[in-house]
Image (tube, rainbow, N blue to C red):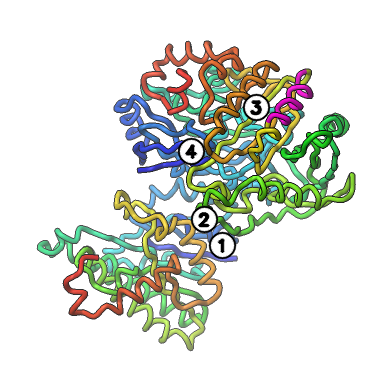
Amino acid sequence: MGYILIIGAKSDIARALARQYAENGYDLYLAARQAGSLEPLAQDISVRFGRKVRCAELDMLDFDNHQAFYDSLEEKPLGVISAVGYLGDQEKAQSDFVEARTILDTNYTSVVSMLNIIADDFAARRSGFIVGISSVAGDRGRKANYLYGSAKAALTTYLSGLRNRLHDHKVRVLTVKPGFVNTRMTKGMGLPEKLTAEPEEVAKAIFTAQQGNRNELYCRWIWKYIMLIIKSIPEWKFKGMSI
Amino acid sequence: MNLRSWGNYPTCDGQALKFDDLDQLRTMLREHNALIAYGNGRSYGDSALSRAMVQMRPRDLFLHFDDQLGVLHVQSGVLLADIIRSIVPKGWFLQVVPGTKLITVGGAIASDVHGKNHHQAGCFSQFLVDFRLMLPNGDIVTCSATEHSDLFHATCGGMGLTGIVLDARIRLKRIGAKTIGQTTIKTANLRETFEAFEQYADSPYSVAWIDCLAKGADIGRCLLRVGDFLPKGKLDYKSSSKPAVPFSLPGFALNTLSVKSFNWLYYGKVKAAVSEQKVSIDSFFFPLDAVGHWNRIYGKNGFTQYQFILPKEASFEGLSVILKTIADSGKGSFLAVLKLYGPANENYLSFPLEGYSLALDFKIEPGLFTLLDKLDEIVLAHGGRIYLAKDARVSRQVFEQGYPDVDKFRALRCKYQMNKTFHSMQSKRLEL
């Protein structure tokens, strides 16, 4: 059928997405830092579903290398999924700009740099899809994670603009806003069971939304309404709250 | 962290441990003295509950598939459901599947699970090429029927008490279609049920649903379902998405009346004495998986499954007494599953032996355990035993009488110092 490129392929959601797309007949490029550690997953997918899986070395913070990376893909992908994400240490980042910039660059700048390149290619080919995994944390700034949240807010806006730009080029863009997901990123946070999705559930929802040409996806769906409520709290009230 | 097993009874306030690599796992084995592997939480009772529960689900990689020999190598946290999704389109199936596909390979080994084809095929362990086991001292050994066979026979059916199963190589069977040709036989009483089992013993798969609340002359009436894969057909298998019971139903939802009506509807729906159907893998092998969290119908207090087996020669008499005792007690069992078994294997604690087993679900309520104690006595009097994967309450004495090899198992636990590392609530109760 053709390849899907997954960047940030080491995350738990990416892992589930890789299996989801492979099961549905796609071959895969899995890109991440220290790509060697993706080999067991690549082997798993080829044993499970008999698809081709290639692991590619990619350091998202090495912006200068993005073009070369994309050029190195022999067969250009049918679609790209960005699962890049770094929660970081909010408290540290408040006083340590190096940490703050790592959070911003990983979650936003690096994705922009990479998706700009891919968007140009897709636009020229007049086909393809882009899935960007943002976060509900980008819907409103909270003291617990506003550096991560602000980068995701920027990403959400970027994806919205990209969707607008690429609409006439027949390229679809899906913005995904997961709520709580049971992953290594949230390990030990004691998340409420009813609001927390498993990575496989998120992957399935993303696949369905992407295949159905949806624009935006909250996962679980209840998060759309939770965030609607959170966004509607007036700022004078919100600033004193701890949520 | 409050992990549960499928029966939601008992509860356990143990610690859920996660490991990223085998060195971390080794450290856990050193640091804990009541640790047990926890797979997908589908054993019914307390066999995977303990102070420290090692989460095995994340260990879910497929390692290799030899499509000439039909041997699949997977890590122990892989679900049977994932295996089926992967192999059915290639024309293969597991040799043995239990009534749910939502269990891990490690769990299948620990409970040495069996399925509708036990009378012909035997248990899950009988199709293992080998598996790797981490012992309490952190050593990893490869176990098979010929290599470290003592560890193999103790681990298969050993309820996780011998170590941590890391990965396994499983022999598969060829299938020509994803569809099963099923025959449904309706019987009027226990005698007819037994006759039907014998008559259809050549069918590879068979299982009977017993109407537990039938009284008098109707006792033991059932729907017997037998079948096999069609020789040729489509292989594109897709697991259907499923409805789920969203929350625990209140305790009163399941009373004698509602169970009675369900049983009557189920049994009464089938009119013909013998009828034939073509059914899917999921509906034939895993009917209950179609309803997510079906355990919630039993309410917050949970339920237990009572599963016992009786040797063939004592089966008819024993089952008659037990079914009458249950009918008289008025305690409704939502499901009662009767099954014919083939010969026992060499594993120390595997459940099956040549005869018949019955599995019944009971909501946890006052007076239940008195009834079950009474059933225990009848089971023992007929030379039978209880299935540990379902159990949450059997006494040490009752358990031991059913399992003559238990002291071999204990001796092996001592020899490898497994009793200083691996324990579940069940193993403490049974002093394993």
B402 relative to A224, above or below: above
Find disc 4 in the rendering and name its residue.
B9
* CA distance for labels 2 and 4: 34 Å
Residue A63 in view: yes
Residue B169 in magenta? Answer: no
Q: x and y percent of residue A183 in the render?
A: 37, 53
Q: x and y percent of residue B30 in the render?
A: 31, 25
Q: Chain of mark 2?
A: A
Find disc 3 in the rendering and name its residue.
B308
* CA distance for labels 1 and 3: 47 Å
For label 3, the crowd category at 10 Å Cα-Cα, with few meaning under 14, some 14 to 19 and many 20 or more, is many
Find disc 2 in the rendering and name its residue.
A19
Find disc 1 in the rendering and name its residue.
A26
Q: Residue at x 33, y 31 (%)?
A: B28
Number of disc labels: 4
Quadrant where the N terminus of chain B is found in the figure: top left
Q: Chain of mark 1?
A: A
Name the amino acid type tagged 3.
Phe
Q: x and y percent of residue B58 in the render?
A: 44, 44
Q: Are marks 3 and 4 on the same chain?
A: yes
Q: Are marks 1 and 3 on the same chain?
A: no
* CA distance for labels 1 and 2: 10 Å
Which numbered disc, 1 or 2, marks the residue that appears first in the sequence? 2
Dot label at residue B49 = none
